[in-house]
Amino acid sequence: MPNSSINPGAASVVPLGNRPFKAVLFDIGGVVVGSPFQGIADFELQHSLPVNYLNVAITRAGHNGAFQRLERGELDLWSFYDAFSDQLSDLRNIAAYAKYAQLRSKVFDEKSFKAPKVDGRALFHQMMSKAAVVNPCMVEAIAALRNAGYTVAALTNNFNYPSDIRGQQEQDLILKNTADSFSVTASSTSTSTSATGNGKGGAIVMGQDQLKTLFDYFIESAILGLRKPDPAIYKKAGEIVGLKPEDIVFLDDIGANLKAAQKEGWTTIRVELGKPRQAIEKLEATLGITLLAPESRL
């Protein structure tokens, strides 16, 4: 564990004699760590872009968009930066956003709006900075589940940093900037950064290698070449953990990912933005056990 302020396994865990479920699977971004969507929202605000303009641009690209290809392991990080910049700066995003705004009765002047020149690397850094900050209550719940004998896995749409020095430096830069943004002291290595803060300004920052140690299985889109909500990734995840669909509870923050899991026969819990504790309470009710210590509920 990178920080003593997270106390894994400290919660009282009371397993049921006849458990209805055997495994809990967690999405990573927006669940175990902060949401990349918050990074997008912050970037839009900083650059005076309409709300959700960049999300619409990412979605418009569809299955073969830069982000989607990165998460299937089809693009290396450096090629992704170029493709992501081009995609987000595409003039066609204006028409796509105009349609989005019209459907939601939002005011948007398509004719006067000028397409931004978006730096894909800068946006990605901001997204990953949000996704590097751990939700301590989720880490506590994961540890408590493992201590209680549940199989615990991550099922994540992700990417992998290049394994060379340049790739390691890129990850360290993101983690260091994340730590600095919380006015904390960071200790960095080529594979991970842990950051601890004093008082309310403190944060816990984890690199990918550290996150993987929290789970029995870490199921990655970039390795499988599949990403949520493709039905095939849920079937593959079930095979990896060796359990039937009815044995699995799944937590994610994206509705489409949860709907696909439900079709596979999984029980699902949605994690609302900024509300991880509420999701854990729903998980406790679903499993019939206690995962968080009383002080973690304050």
Image (tube, rainbow, N blue to C red):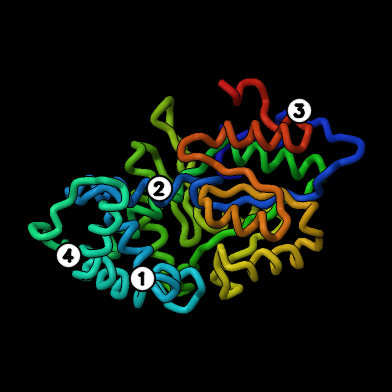
Q: Nearer the viewer, residue 61 or 210?
A: 61
Q: Which residue is mark 3?
A: 12
In this rendering, the answer to whether 267 lies above or below 113 is: above
Q: Nearer the viewer, residue 53 or 238?
A: 53
Q: Tell me the amino acid under the disc marked 4.
A: Lys
Label 2 or label 1, whichever lies nearer to me, is: 1
Label 3 or label 4, whichever lies nearer to me, is: 4
* Picture residue at 40% right of the left edge, 58% below the top: 172
In the picture as drawn, the residue positioned furthest to the right comes out as 17
**For marks 2 and 3 on the same chain, the one whose residue lies earlier in the sequence:** 3
Determine the secondary structure under disc 3.
loop
Q: Which residue is mark 2?
A: 130
**For marks 3 and 4 on the same chain, the one whose residue lies earlier in the sequence:** 3
Q: Is residue 214 visible?
A: no
* Picture residue at 59% right of the left edge, 53% below the top: 258
Q: Which mark is residue 117?
A: 4
**For marks 2 and 4 on the same chain, the one whose residue lies earlier in the sequence:** 4
Q: Is residue 116 visible?
A: yes
